[in-house]
Amino acid sequence: MAPYLPWLWTAGLLHLAIASSNFVAAKKLEYRRNLAGVTPIVREIFWVQNLYIELVLAAFALIIFLFPRELTAGVGLGQFLSGFLAVFWGLRLVIQFAFYDAEIRRQHPGIDRLFLAAQIYLTAVFFVAAAAGWWM
Amino acid sequence: MVDVMNAGLLGNLILAAGVGQLALVVGSLAIPRVLGWREETARLRPLTRQVFWTYAAYIWTTNASFGLLSVFAPAALLDRSTLAAAVSGFIAVYWGSRLAIQFLVFDRSEAPAGRFFRIAEVALVLLFAALTFVYGSALVWNLRVVEL
């Protein structure tokens, strides 16, 4: 078995876990009730955003499971995708610290740490995968 | 020879699609102001508001990445590898579903009124349809469904 496979399979599973957690968040944060006060168009945009994030996460997971060799080859489309995923999760990490309310994060320390760990792992794995071509 | 010409044509179409997506990315920066997102999302609870803006940023980044990939490496989307088929197919589904959502989900009576916004909506719908067609064609090309 190629040494990179367990790292990427874990990354694929994390994508599915994060996608699933969005369903829990929709219930726990009471999106439906919470969105009742905004205009219909903004409400619709929010639901469409949710749908698209789920679509993108599921597609990433599928690509990770089906094309691990290409993602770690360090060339072409595979390298672009790994680089994009590194930026995608790196940006999410920055958002977690710079944008999300520190007080809310303190109220949910377990979830906050889990998300941080997942974001750090995904950023690191895809950074290494994208950079593979530089030292291979 | 015909094969090479078709690849060249598709490559140019993908390049044009990339330019279209980057134009959309730039244009969509105006959407929050036009639809008053700041005022609207102020009515949401803080965490839901932060999720709203985070998701908006992610969709914007994804659109930008499709545009950059198509402008700078159109050939990578047409190399007839399984990965190229998967990515071009995914982008086709992404824009195809956006086209369907425009008609099936959004309540267009709520959209801003006026000729400018009507023209902008028509332009958007045409762009979504063109993007679906171009990346769908790339998928067909990569899967070698049609050999010309």
Image (tube, coloured by chain):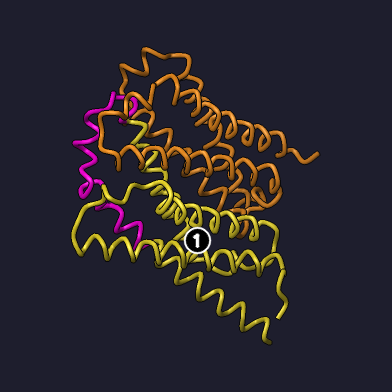
Q: Which chain is orange?
A: A
User: What chain letter is assigned to the residue under label 1?
Assistant: B
**Element carrying mark 1:** helix
- Residue sitting nearer the eye, A116 or B25: B25
Residue A105 image position (x, y, % from top left): 37, 18
Q: Nearer the viewer, residue B99 or A13?
A: B99
At horizontal 62% and vertical 40% (from top left) the residue drawn is A61
Horizontal and vertical percent for residue A95?
Answer: 37, 33
Q: Does A84 appear in magenta? A: no
Q: Is residue A74 above or below residue A49?
A: below
Q: Quadrant of residue A124?
A: top right
The magenta span reads: B22-49
Amino acid type shown at disc 1:
Leu
Shown in yellow, the chain is B
Residue nearest the viewer, comparing A38 with B109:
B109
Quadrant where the N terminus of chain A sits is top right
| Residue under pointer 1 | B69
Does A118 sit above or below residue A133?
Answer: above
Image position of B7 (left or right of A104): right
A109 on left or right of A129 = left
The residue depicted at 45 percent of the width and 50 percent of the height is B62
Is B35 included in the stretch rendered in magenta? yes
A119 horizontally vs B88: left or right: left
Q: Is residue B132 above or below residue A41?
A: below
Q: Residue at x 34, y 35 (%)?
A: B52
